[in-house]
Image (cartoon, rainbow, N blue to C red):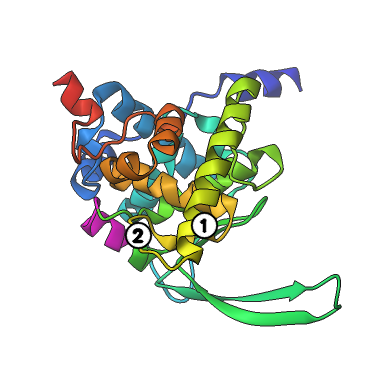
């Protein structure tokens, strides 16, 4: 038994072959914009993801190993500063060809009425269950990396949010920062909801007003795809996300971390 334990502890960390690294650089428009050390960190996280998660295509979809690496790297982008802890608690990625339908129900405790409906989704993140993604939407995000949408980032933000056992728009953070985060995000969320409820146009996707956890996930997408817009609309939120995720690889309105390194 002790020999087995020693073998498990001494097992080398998975690595990403040079060929796969080169393919990712061609396939992911934002990857070359990462500073070298962060690019290496992404490769390490991607290797862990591929070794530890089952990527399962459904509804007749087929994915090559190269495409699976794209999914893994895109999902690891929000973990560059947070680290591999963000991969804990789940083991599978379900990938649909496109948008998929999910059955929903709500029980009103006061009236006893149960309401049922169907949602059309491009992604979903279950608390202790799989990550669910639409392949078509992932490809659309890669085709327009600065359009404000990053499906894998959105769903991984939910996974980070759920790590403390409550999906409420606040990932696990040091106590002092968590208190400041909760105050600032709640204030920004309420102000944004007021604008949406009043029928005003918003530069940020109004879906962010659905719930605090969606506000966190949507603004996370903007950090990685339209950081200048997010900073202009919600500077306090943008500052928190910069601290959580590190510099955005998109240099829109400024410079990326790779540009800073030359």
SS for callout 2: helix
Is 226 situated above or below 12?
Answer: below
Asked whether residue 218 is drawn in magenta, I would say no
Is 231 situated above or below 59?
Answer: above
In this rendered view, identify the residue nearer to me: 241 or 180.
180
81 displayed left or right of 261: right
Query: Which quadrant would residue 6 be assigned to in this image?
Result: top right
Q: How many marks?
A: 2
Q: Residue at x 57, y 50 (%)?
A: 213
Structural distance between the alpha carbons of marks 2 and 1? 27 Å
Spot occupied by residue 66 in the image (x, y as percentages of width and height): 31, 52
Q: Main secondary structure of the magenta part?
A: helix
Spot occupied by residue 248 in the image (x, y as percentages of width and height): 31, 35
Q: Residues within 10 Å of mark 1 (few under 14, many from 20)?
A: some
What residue is shown with label 1?
Answer: 193
Residue 208 is at least partly visible in this image:
no
Spot occupied by residue 58 in the image (x, y as percentages of width and height): 49, 70
Task: Specify the quadrant that holds the N terminus.
Answer: top right
| Number of the label disc, if any, that sits on residue 138 | 2
Q: Nearer the viewer, mark 2 or mark 1?
A: 1
Residue 1 is at least partly visible in this image:
yes
Is 58 situated above or below 156?
Answer: below
Circles 2 and 1 in contact, beta carbons < 8 Å: no
164 displayed left or right of 230: right
147 displayed left or right of 218: left
Asked whether residue 139 is drawn in magenta, I would say yes
Spot occupied by residue 72 in the image (x, y as percentages of width and height): 41, 46
Query: Which quadrant would residue 9 be assigned to in this image?
Result: top right
Task: Specify the quadrant that holds the C terminus.
Answer: top left
Query: What segment is highlighted magenta in the picture?
Result: 138-146
In this rendered view, identify the residue nearer to me: 192 or 78.
192
């Amino acid at each position: 038994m002790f020999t087995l334990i020693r073998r498990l502890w001494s097992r080398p960390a998975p690595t990403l072959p040079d060929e796969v690294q080169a393919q990712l650089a061609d396939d992911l428009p934002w990857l070359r914009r990462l500073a070298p050390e962060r690019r290496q960190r992404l490769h390490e996280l991607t290797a862990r993801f591929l070794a530890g998660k089952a990527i399962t295509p459904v509804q007749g979809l087929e994915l090559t190993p190269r495409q699976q690496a794209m999914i893994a790297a895109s999902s690891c982008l929000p973990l560059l500063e947070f680290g591999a802890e963000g991969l804990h608690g789940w083991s599978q990625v379900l990938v649909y060809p496109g948008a998929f339908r999910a059955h929903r129900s709500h029980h009103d405790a006061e009236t006893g009425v149960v309401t049922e409906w169907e949602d059309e989704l491009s992604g979903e993140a279950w608390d202790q269950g799989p990550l669910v993604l639409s392949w078509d939407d992932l490809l659309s995000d890669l085709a327009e990396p600065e359009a404000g949408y990053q499906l894998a980032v959105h769903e991984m933000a939910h996974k980070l949010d759920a790590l403390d056992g409550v999906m409420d728009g606040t990932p696990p953070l040091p106590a002092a920062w968590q208190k400041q985060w909760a105050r600032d995000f709640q204030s920004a969320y309420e102000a944004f909801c007021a604008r949406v409820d009043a029928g005003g146009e918003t530069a940020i996707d109004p879906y962010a007003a659905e719930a605090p956890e969606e506000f966190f996930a949507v603004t996370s997408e903007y950090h990685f795809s339209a950081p200048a817009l997010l900073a202009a609309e919600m500077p306090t939120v943008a500052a928190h996300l910069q601290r959580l995720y590190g510099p955005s690889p998109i240099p829109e309105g400024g410079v990326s971390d790779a540009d800073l390194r030359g």
